Image (cartoon, helix red, strand yellow):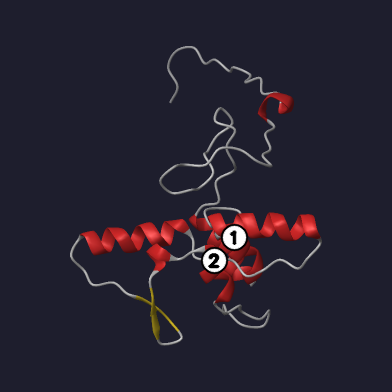
Amino acid sequence: VTVGYMYILKLVHMAEDKIHARSTGPYSLVTQQPLGGRAHSGGQRFGEMEVWALEAYGAAHTLQEMLTIKSDDVAGRVRTYEAIVKGEPIQEPGIPESFKILVKELQSLGLLVEVEREGQVVDISRETEEDVMEIPRWRPSLGER
């Protein structure tokens, strides 16, 4: 039941005012992830539901790229840029900065958290670019999930 006057307002949104793209730009000092939003020259958010959609579709390589190289894998970003400029194949991504922060937060709670690769403990806080280049990485094949 409606009582009183009803008003309809037209919202004016122009596509040219809304469009936004990013090739390079600033990154957060703590997480090393791209800043968000048009005002900060940031990137588009790739949220949890988008991750689920790519998982359901089986796009493992695209998902890996979005969560590492295009996000907070600092060494991976540099190596990828250099490989593209030199015309070489792109190498495997490294450990994302967000994972390193998670491990450090858990360790600050007094938990013993160790990252293992092929049965050996890896010190991710001292991981240098040379260490990253030497470590073989597991990469899912297109048929695996």
Who comes first in sequence, dot 1 or dot 2?
A: 1
- If the image is split into quadrants, where does the N terminus sit? top left
The picture places residue 126, in percent across and down from the top left corner, at: 40, 64
Task: Residue 139: tell me if it is visible.
Answer: yes
The image quadrant that residue 83 belongs to is bottom right
Residue 26 or residue 19, whichever sits in front: 26
Residue at the (68%, 38%) spot, across then down: 21
Q: Secondary structure at mark 1?
A: helix
* Disc number placed over residue 76 in the picture, else none: 1
The answer to whether 104 appears left or right of 120 in the picture is: left
Residue at the (41%, 67%) spot, across then down: 124
The picture places residue 135, in percent across and down from the top left corner, at: 54, 77
Residue 143 or residue 14, whichever sits in front: 143
Residue at the far front: name it.
Answer: 130
Residue 82 or residue 51, whichever sits in front: 82
* Disc number placed over residue 131 in the picture, else none: none
Residue at the far top: name it.
Answer: 5
- Amino acid, disc 1: Gly
The answer to whether 96 appears left or right of 85 in the picture is: left
Residue 77 versus residue 110 in the image, above or below: above
- Amino acid, disc 2: Gly
Query: Is disc 1 in contact with disc 2, using a CB cutoff of under 8 Å?
Result: yes
Which residue has dot 2 on it?
Answer: 94
Residue 6 or residue 96, whichever sits in front: 96
CA separation in Å, label 1 and label 2: 6 Å
- If the image is split into quadrants, where does the C terminus sit? bottom right
Q: Callout 1: few (<14), some (14-19), or many (20+) C-alpha neighbours within 10 Å?
A: many
The image quadrant that residue 105 belongs to is bottom left
Residue at the (79%, 59%) spot, across then down: 86
The picture places residue 13, in percent across and down from the top left corner, at: 66, 23
Task: Residue 69: tell me if it is visible.
Answer: no
Residue 47 versus residue 117 in the image, above or below: above
